[in-house]
Image (cartoon, rainbow, N blue to C red):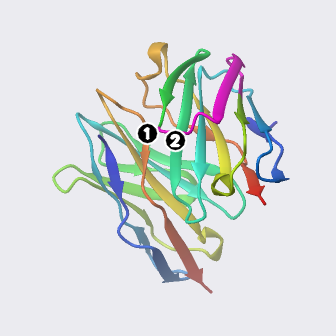
Amino acid sequence: AQSVAQPEDQVNVAEGNPLTVKCTYSVSGNPYLFWYVQYPNRGLQFLLKYITGDNLVKGSYGFEAEFNKSQTSFHLKKPSALVSDSALYFCAVRGSYGNNRLAFGKGNQVVVIP
Amino acid sequence: DTAVSQTPKYLVTQMGNDKSIKCEQNLGHDTMYWYKQDSKKFLKIMFSYNNKELIINETVPNRFSPKSPDKAHLNLHINSLELGDSAVYFCASSQEGAGGWSSYNEQFFGPGTRLTVL
């Protein structure tokens, strides 16, 4: 079955500094990878996804993520963090065959310090 | 225009009661989901319907019964509520195609229903 690991509980970063949120995955077949963001008391919002093609994908609000097949990783990045980026970030994966339901990681709380 | 809406937003009730949460999507999607988010923010899928047919039924107590009257609606009825049912319940939708397995499309989430069982 597919699974996602987000090793850190919380990521603290100073405003203006680069932000990275880590994600590794395990899946049967080719991975379809997603990042979602959840602001307080809100539902999850889609940020970006990797399906195929260029390993670097760009998404909403200046976020991007890099797919690394050999390391089975899909880390989320933003060159310059904003205070408004403080939220809970979820990585998710589904496989290209078999039981390919979407599996979410446990989430990472990002705190951007002014 | 709300894409995925849920009602109610908050639900406070006593143990043993029966309650329902409603979900509607106006995106024209063919697949809808119920997720449970616990107090530690873990997100766990409960059910999924594709074209009104149940395709995912995770290990959920049979006190939980989903119903999909049409492709745009997925309701969740909970019987005999227990303290452990307290959580935030999210509805979501996506376009998956026949069978509900074929797509890599993203899911769209509703705002959540915070259920508190006293």
Judge left or right: residue B71 versus residue B8.
left
| Pointer 2 residue | B45
Magenta-colored span:
B59-74
Point out residue B42 in the picture as x, y percentages from the top left corner: 51, 58
Judge left or right: residue A95 versus residue B7.
left
Q: Secondary structure at mark 1?
A: loop
Q: Place residue B7 in its image quadrant.
A: top right
Q: Is residue B51 visible?
A: yes
Q: Residues within 10 Å of mark 2 (few under 14, many from 20)?
A: many
Quadrant holding the N terminus of chain A: top left
Residue at (57, 79) in percent of width and height: A112
Q: Is residue B87 visible?
A: no
Residue at (55, 32) in percent of width and height: B47
Q: Amino acid at mark 2?
A: Ile
Residue at (59, 54) in percent of width and height: B37
Is-magenta flag for residue B68?
Answer: yes
Q: Does the CB distance between marks 1 and 2 fall below 8 Å?
A: yes
Q: Of all residues shown, which one is farthest toward the left?
A: A70
Quadrant holding the C terminus of chain A: bottom right
| Pointer 1 residue | A102
Judge left or right: residue B10 versus residue A28.
right
What chain is tagged by disc 1? A
Q: Marks 1 and 2, Cα distance to the nearest angstrom?
A: 9 Å
Judge left or right: residue A66 versus residue B83.
left
Is-magenta flag for residue A113?
Answer: no
Q: Secondary structure at mark 2?
A: strand
Query: Can marks 1 and 2 be said to lie on one chain?
Result: no
Point out residue A30 in the picture as x, y percentages from the top left corner: 25, 35
Indicate which label's residue lies in the foreground, 1 or 2: 2
Q: Amino acid at mark 1?
A: Leu
Point out residue B73 in the picture as x, y percentages from the top left corner: 73, 24
Q: Which mark is residue A44?
A: none
